[in-house]
Amino acid sequence: MAFKLQPASDTLLGSTLGDESLGDRWVLNFGPQHPATHTTLQLVLELDGEVVVGCTPHIGYLHSGFEKQGEHLNYNQYVVITDRMNYLSPMANNLAWHYAVEKLFGVVPPRRCQYIRVLMAELARIADHLVSIGTAALDLGAMTGFVYGFEERETIYDLMEIASGSRYNTSYSRLGGLMYDLPDAFWPRLDELFDRLPPIVDDIEKLLNRNRIFIERTRGVGVIGREEAINWSLTGPIARASGVRRDLRKDEPYFVYDELEFKVPLADGGDCFARYLVRLEEIRQSMGIVRQCREGMPPGPVNAEPEVKVTLPGKDEVYGSIEGLIHHFEIVMTNRGFVAPIGEAYGANETANGELGYYVVADGSPRPYRSRCRPPSFINYSVFPELIVGHQISDVPAVLGSLNIIAAELDR
Amino acid sequence: MSEPAADIPVAPGPLDAHPGVKVLRERFGDAGLDPRDTIVRGRAIGMPTVTLARDVLEEAMGLLKSDPRAAFDQLTELTCVDYLKFPQVQPGRFGVTYGLLSTTLNHRLWAKVFVNESDLSVPSVTSLWKGANWLEREVFDLFGVVFEGHPDLRRILTPAGFKDFPLRKDFPLTGKGWRESFRPVTRDEA
């Protein structure tokens, strides 16, 4: 079906557009409903022929006031909202939230819990990278890699379901622990993943690394240098693809990352291809971390001791002893609950898109006074107009895909 | 803005040794810096925060970025807290919070600037860190703090034409009744 491109109009880019001296310039409205944006992003592209000369992103289509809601839910309830932020790796959001809150409360979860958290965070990273690589390639016409990646993501989501009861909105972590310990059925399925994933990653690599079309469309496209990347607040694979040596897992080790062996992939191209390479290698490194967690998983409880008064006691304790019953009620009753100290804390985890931080201000009540999320997608997307200017219009999906913008996290 | 809030204990030792605090002290003395950290069970959680006066903000931030001992080359976080209903009295209603990170020296420093409704302007740091662009727009959008010198200060998350600042504490969670007062639209009108 033929459709008409939207003509330049004053309402889109301001008054410069009525100007006849602009010659061949015109305006293309890209999104908010466009397959390559994956979600609701709007770009107003000012074009000179096919070359982008100006780009104004409009965001906020998915703004749903998560931070405002955070001020009205308690420290455990808010984890449900964090699921909805980065929908490619909800588990990582849960863990980052409770990492910040535990920092604020001064609670250290037991070792088994920390190992499970690392394992889950790495599975979430693999799932996220599989989809982001897949969709980045899909937007450039390479359907196969996307399908391969999506299938394995489904296996990982099955694992999430076994662990938390929900494949997607996991809400798995709790203050000082986890919702449940991992069930026995988890481990054989995880071993299955070990067998299935490496050949798939190799296949994706074979499909894309020497794919002429993919290389031509990503090499030298959307280049950002090292200094610029730091100055633009970029983190995660995008910064590392520009040669920034920084990974919170190494630089500010949290959970038990300092006991595990892994390498942080680094590239210096700074273009879409470098970002793809970094993500692909991170999948392999994450598989190694998951394997180490599988082998080194310590026994023991997953919740912090009852003395810290933030975790629910076990059911046998609640029904078997009066202390346990009182403890249970103290936590669940709305006018009681655990009480936070007065102060503020910032905790950040290295998630698939970069530094996902939560800045929590507590006023001594059961609910946070302010629950700010430092969303990596928001910051990664702010650099987009800089990256795309001077490129052709067909490079827009390539750069968008390589940045892996998640609109739910972008707008919150 | 000198008196520290009464109940937040100040941990002098590690904060005085913090290179960022040192750099600021050398230039500005101790006036109003008020370095502090959240103390939980007698232990500092490692979030060194300094308070900066609005008129020295630009210079202080420039210093923190350029001084090789501090070398804060990245602005990881910029946000705001509305202290309207906070149990401890703060030097101002809005605390604009800057999270600085040095990627070379691997340390962080947090800085706060307090402003009141009578004058909501804060100098922009976009000239130092480009990443501040959208972060400042977000704070402007949700809190109404105006960043002087920002190249493109528009609303970013809420729709254009929106009049309120939703993350302020006096803005109700359920909005201000727009949802209830939507006029039913008939088929003929649509």
Image: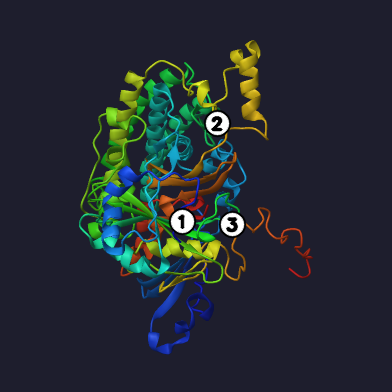
Callout 1: chain: B
Return the residue nearer the eye: B180 or A9.
B180
Side (left or right) of A351 relative to B139: left
Question: Do pointers 1 and 2 mark residues of a single chain?
Answer: no
Find residue A57 and report its horizontal and vertical position in percent: 45, 65
Location of residue A16 (image quadrant): bottom left
**Residue where numbered disc 3 is placed:** B84
Q: Looking at the image, is mark 1 or mark 3 earlier in the sequence?
A: 1
Q: Residue at x 46, y 53 (%)?
A: B4
Q: CA distance from mark 1 to mark 3?
A: 18 Å
What is the spatial separation of the Cα atoms under label 1 and label 2, in whole angstroms? 49 Å
Q: Which residue is mark 1?
A: B3
Disc sitting over residue A166 in the figure: 2
Question: Is any atom of residue A74 visible in this view?
Answer: yes
Q: How far is mark 2 from mark 3, CA to CA?
A: 39 Å
Q: Position of residue A34 (x, y in %)?
A: 49, 58
Amino acid type, label 1 = Glu
Q: Nearer the viewer, mark 1 or mark 2?
A: 1
Question: What's the residue type where badge 2 is placed?
Answer: Ser
Residue at 25% of width from left, 33% of height from top? A262
State whether residue A386 is above or below residue A240.
below
Residue A294 image-quadrant placement: top left
